Structures are given as C-alpha cells and as structure tokens.
Amino acid sequence: MIFQGGGSLGAYEAGVYKATYELLSERDVKLGRKGKPIFHIVAGTSIGAMNAAVLVSYVKENKSWQGSADRLIEFWEYMATESFMDSIPSFNQWWNYLHYFYKDLASSESARRYYNTKQFMFRGVPNVFTISTMLEDRRFLDPINTQYLYSNKPLKKSLEKFAKFPIATSYQNNEPRLLLVSVDVQEGSTVVFDSYEKEGGIRKTEYGRYGPEYSRGPNDPEGYEYVISHNDGIEVDFVLASGSVPVNYEYTKLQVEDTNSSHRIKSGIEKQKEEWDNPTTKKVRYFWDGDIIANTPLREAVIEHRRYWASVRKSEVPPLRVFIVNVHPIKQDSLPADHDALVDRKNDLTYHDRTLFDERMALMMTDYVKIANRLIKLAEDNKIEKSLIDDILKQQADTRNFSTGKHLRFADLIEHMVSVEQVIRIERKNDTHTISNKTFDFSRTTVRNLIRDGYEETLEQEDEILQVWDSEHPR
C-alpha cells in the first residue's frame, strides 16, 4: 500500500484504506486465508507517512489488522476541527444570493473551503499545526517578502497519541514493513526510513555516495556516506521529517553519521595490524518533505523490497502487487480560468502520481527476465555446457545497482529482479468545488467528506481489486 502526501487530503486515504480492508479481509475469510497480512508493505510520504505509521503501529501492537481501519479514521477525526464557516448556518443562502449580482462567483461549497483554509493558514489547526513565527526579509529588505513558519509540535503529539514509537517490525513475526520517505535538503536525494532490519541484523538508513572511501572499519570495507542508526525502530521525528513542508515548516534536524575521508585515519600499518580511528562523525543534517522528489514512493518501495530479499533473506524476491492512492488527480475536465484555479491545477500536476513509467519499466524488465530464463533452460535442454552459460552470466552488465552505483553482473539482473505483477490505482476525483489550498482544509465537514469519498470511490473498483488479490501469490 502506497500513500501519497497531500495534507488534509490524507483523510481520503483513510477512506480508501477502510474500504480496501473490508474488501480484502472479507475475501480472505471466504478463501480460507484468514490471518494473512492485508499488506506486507505500507509506504508513505508526508501525510501518507503519518497514515502509514498509525496503521503499522496499530497492527504491531495489536497483532491483528482487525480494527486498523477504525483506528485510522479516529486519527483523522481527532485532527479535524470546527471551522468558523461551518458555524454560520445561513452562509450558503447568503452566498448563493450573491450569485444574482456576481455571475462569476464561486459556488458556496468552494467559498466554504476557501475561507476555511484562510482561517487555518492564519490561525492554525489545534491538533495539526500552529503559527510559529514571522521572519522578515533581511536579505533584500522587502517587507512583502515575509516568511510565515508553522510549528508541527501539535502534529507530533497527535502522532504519539495514535502510534507507539519507535516502530520496529519484522517479517518473521508476520508484521508489515513500514517505509517512510524524506529528502536530505543539501544532498538532494530521497532518504528511506525502514522498520525492517538491514544486513547484519540492525536497523539503519543509508544514503549518499557509496564506496571504499566510506568504509567504517575492516569488517565493513565499503559503505555509504551517511548513516542514520535506528535499531530500536522508526522514531516520530522520522515521520515528521517526511512531512516537513518546505518554506512552511522549519527543517527537521536529525543526527547523522557522516563518514568523510578527512575523518578517517588508518593507523598501525607499520605494526601490520588494522586499526581505525574516528571512522565516523555525528553531524546534524536537515530534512524536508519527501513529496518534493517522491510523492508516490513506488520506486523507493521496489528498491527496498529487492534489497531486503536479496541481501537480508538471501532468497528469491517475491513478486509485488501495488495499491496506490493518488490524491492529486492527473486529469481535469474543466480548464482553469482564474488565479486560484490555475494554482490548484499546477499543484495537482506537481504532486500527482508519476509512477506509470516506473510500472511499465518494471513490467518490461520482468518480461526480459522471463525470456532470459527460458533461453537458459533451452540451452541446458540442448546439452550446452553449463560453464559456457555461466561465463556469460558472470560478465559485467552496463546496469548499476540503484543504491550503491556498482556495476552488476548479468546474473544479478536475473536472480534478484523485482516482478511488479499488478498496480491498482485509486484516484481521487476533483469535483467542481476544488480550491488551490485544499491541503489546508482540516475542517470537520471536509475531513468527513474526504473519508466518505475515499470509501465510496474505492468500492467503485471492487471487482478490479478482488480480481487482483484473489491469486495465491504473496502480496
């Protein structure tokens, strides 16, 4: 399950998950698969990371998926708040009356949402964010260029109320894997926090350049430039790092092990022994919302899936079936004609699901692997010497490992390829009342409407969902 970022639109994801859980759990009972995980992986960016954390934490603590949908709905009911516009009983009548005088006026529902976001942007949402400070422009001395910063301390408390941190899960315990995506501001790359163990049986996040110059000792001759150790599990600050919206929020600061050649001194060579002094240095690095680069983290999920099965479990990589919730519609019937509509359309196109190309490439690579395996079998059946086949498979390929950048062998392309068998997308429908700052509308009315829409629009694809999930292959 992959959840996108989108502020208050995360309530739509809660509705989608509720419908999905009901469909799949009911079908599992009918097929005698009761007790199997609804999803093996739950990945998310920004508000999607928060939805994912609440779900996985619930399943881990309760050792069951039953009740997980209700828990996620409770999370959203808790974050929603009453708005001033919803407290005016005659607002719709008054606004509709103005249509007699101003023909280009927005609908009363659009106006309700629009002024809700104005209220929340300037006064905050009690359980989500508060106004922190205003920063005057001291670079250009422009009084208009004022930056408004929000505090996510209320959101942190909300997360800690509905999820138990740190979150550490394992495949052996039949627990779902939690993957959260953030961005290192200076490195400019995605950073994935993982609740499963890595190689060596520890939990850590590794990113940046890779090679012998980033070694952490004689037992680890090659390594990554940056490492965030979190053996106890995913911390709440990692979730906040995934949702630190640029400009609106301050950077999320995390302690990172920074391996740099200037900090590494190999000593004792004259004594013919391996001793390493100060191989790493703890530094603070700064993180932003993952939606800048990977608002739909399909690629990150596939890479981490392959890495776990190839490097940790050292076995065949199970095929994936992916369920994506797209809260930013790619298509829109109407052409935007005013400033707010133009900004709204730009935002949807900026953050919409861009993984169709990734999906098609994964399917194409799966076909290439099938062809290669059939050709290998054909060669073996026709008594071609195995050593001749092995000589080809040992040759260096042009393809490089996505994580390390090292060249792969042809055998690696076949042995550890991820097969993405099917992708189901639930796409939120943009109604005629949409506004540009819709991600700020945490009003109780809007949140409940989004949950309802997510639930109903998922049920519209019931046949497709059940058809894909009916197979006996692992999810």
Image (cartoon, rainbow, N blue to C red):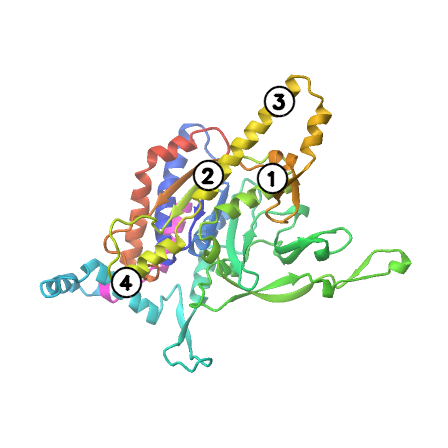
Task: Give the left or right position of residue 313, taking residue 276 as reference.
Answer: left
Task: State the separation of the CA atoms marked 1 and 4.
Answer: 47 Å
Check disc 3: other Cα within 10 Å, few if <14, some if 14-19, many if 20+. few
Q: Which residue is mark 2?
A: 360
For disc 1, the marked residue is 309
Residue 73's place in the image compared with 188, above or below, is: above
Crowding at dot 2, Cα within 10 Å, few <14 / some 14-19 / many 20+, comes out as: few
Give how far across and how far down residue 304 sits, in percent.
56, 45
Of the image marks 2 and 1, the number of the one nearer the N terminus: 1
Q: Determine which residue is flagged by label 3.
A: 377
Mark 1 vs 4: CB contact within 8 A: no
Q: Position of residue 150 (x, y in %)?
A: 42, 70
Q: Is residue 67 visible?
A: no
Q: Which residues are magenta?
A: 66-86
Mark positioned earlier in the residue sequence (1 or 4)? 1
x then y, percent, for residue 444: 29, 58
Nearer to us: label 1 or label 4? 4
